[in-house]
Image (cartoon, coloured by chain):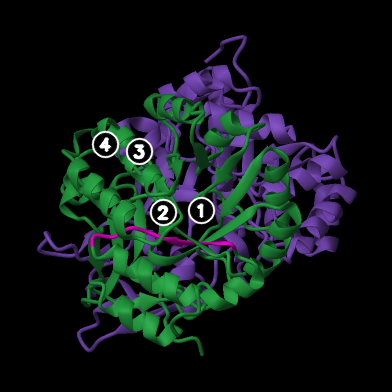
Chain colours: A green, B purple
Amino acid sequence: MSGAELTIGPILFHWSADKKRDFYFRIADEAPVDTVYIGEVICSKRAPFFEPYYDEVAERLTRAGKKIVFSSLAEIMLPREQKMTKGLCELEEYEVEANDAAALYHLRGKPHRVGQYFNVYNEDTMAHLTSQGAVHFTVPSELPKEALSVLSNKAEELNVGLEVQVYGRTGLALSARCYHARSHNRAQDNCQFVCEEDPDGMELKTLDGKPFLSVNGIQTLSHTCLNLMHEVNEMQGMGITHFRLSPHSHDMVSVARAFRAVLDKDCAADEGVKKLEQAGFKGTFSRGFYHGNPGYAWKTA
Amino acid sequence: MNDHDAIRPELVCPAGTPASLRTAVDAGADAVYCGFQNATNARNFAGLNFTPEEMETSVLYAHEHGAKVLLAANTFPPAGKTGLWKEAVDTAVGFGIDAIIVADIGVANYVKTQYPDQRLHLSVQAGAPSVEAIKYYCEEFGVRRVVLPRILTIPEITVLKKEIPCEIECFIFGNHGLMAEGRCSLTNYVTGLSTNMDGVCSPASHVKYEEDTKRNLTTRLGDFTIDCFSCTQNPGYPTICKGRYLAPHKQEGYYAFEEPISLNLARLLPELVKAGVHAFKIEGRQRSRAYVREVVSSWRKAVDDMMDGQDVELAHLLSLTEGHKQTQGAYENKRWR
């Protein structure tokens, strides 16, 4: 139970290569996290920008004692995406996290992880993937606690890691169409990387002005920020082993410290939430999925 | 088209009720797809779908008339509740169902291990658009046909067909969802009911229409406004991915994902056959019997005319969308993306 590990999920948004490098350096130096997932998950067009930095970033994180996992694309359709995925799955020095069946195709038979964009909803799916070499699962964010509880029993039985996202905007949908490009009346092939203007996603409000969703290229995320600070101790009790923080442009080191303190029972959840409120996220928190409520909800009644 | 090697494509039609199934069979469907009255299928709407008894008699009816019945068991069982999906599979296999359409790996593995001879189709909900993803499901579970996501161009489908060991089924007509199937939690985010786990998308129980004094109509899902219409506009059903929203750099609300639009591939039928597509799928298990009769018989004639080398009556097929805007979506060219 006390072995709960904190992880930093892949950066979902299109940050400049320098910004990503600086983010990872700071995580390496200051954040109490155990594992860092790197790699482009959303858009294959963005991937080349950061490639020259991987060695430097991986070295810095490794020297800081962090485990590095490469995450695959969440949607693999084009030849360049197929090629990129095949290359990623051939990496020998790092574990790879599959977010699509195309990555599983290559990873079968050797140890690998399964990411939150691949649908692992139940114990039967988990058992089959484990029989093919999966050693660690990050499950979809919409699973309620009853299902997480069953999955954690199964994970324990199979001796695999079970990870749940506990912080950050929640990915709600993927598409073949880029909604960033669409909003600027551009085709995806001529997007001019307009998504870089929105480091935490582009806000969509309803016609009556209520914040609703965030657009990140082909991905649609919640506008609210998932915050399971009050729930992490319960999840530890269930046997969930890893807790994922999804990167944003605000102070993720403070976020990591707040979660670490609550996981270690050095700090009460209420106090942890107060720390999160000071970390710089502009918007409201949510935790509906875990409690079986609409995902955007904070109230648990 | 008179190619000797051309496959005669199967027309796969929707049935939300036993009456619709008989209508579709009578109107010329080669196969009908349907589901049980619970969360095991992706159209789990009140008043729709089949009891086990209805499924049994429907399979008999279809078989007597030379048509196949495909069970949609294409949602994702949440942990602890897989029994309901296994029961659906057991029941349908017992009735001699022709194929089971699955998306979840656990369900696929159950069919493969319990009923190794049972024909298995991979649902569009599994979201498998690449050679590798499709081969994964074929090799792991013996999938015999993949229902392709509506995101590929015809040249891409042509290339794909040559490299995969199974048949391809393509949507040709009906509602056109924008998000990758099986990977959308928008409805759950707003309503607390999940498309993947409960089989619902924008459920009617959470829809509200509010009219103001000037007869402007606001459509809402749960606590969120999806669109607003003036009294002269035809209001659409509030599906999140077909709504209008505000973005910081835009002056007015816009269809951030897609406008309300229907898929209609009437013009592309010959190209789809050339690409090697085995089955044409019509969306619409939630539609009326009258709609099913009209749509199925029209497409039956179109497919037969095309295969016999006759001209296809395009104007009639294009009129089937009932005044909605229509699109050829991604099939036409990649600018759609």
- Find numbered disc 1 in the image and state the secondary structure of the residue it sits on: loop
Identify the mark nearer the N-term, 1 or 3. 3
Confirm or deny contact between disc 4 and disc 1 (CB under 8 A): no
Which chain is indicated by disc 1?
A: A
The magenta segment is: A241-249
Q: Residue beneath label 1, please?
A: A116
The residue under the point 35% across, 38% down is: A59
Mark 4 crowd level (few <14, some 14–19, many ≥20, 10 Å Cα): some
- Neighbor class of circle 3 (other Cα within 10 Å; few <14, some 14-19, many 20+) is some
Task: Indicate which disc, 2 or 1, sits on the residue closer to the N terminus.
Answer: 2
In the image, residue B175 lies at what x, y percent?
46, 52
From mark 1 to mark 3, how far is it between C-alphas? Answer: 26 Å
Gap between marks 2 and 4 measured at Cα: 16 Å
Is there a contact, CB below 8 Å, between mark 2 and mark 1?
yes
Residue type at tag 2 = Gly
Was residue A244 drawn as part of the magenta stretch in this picture?
yes
- N-term-proximal mark, 2 vs 4: 2
* Residue extending furthest toward the top: B4
Amino acid type of disc 4?
Phe
User: What chain is tagged by disc 4?
Assistant: A
Judge from the rendering whether residue A246 lies leftward or rightward of residue B289; answer left or right. left
Q: Secondary structure at mark 3?
A: helix
Q: Mark 3 highlights which residue?
A: A59
The numbered disc on residue A50 is: 4
Question: Of B230 and A64, which appears nearest the observer?
Answer: A64
Q: Considering depth in this image, is A85 or A29 the residue closer to the camera?
A: A29
Mark 3 or 2 closer to N-term?
A: 2
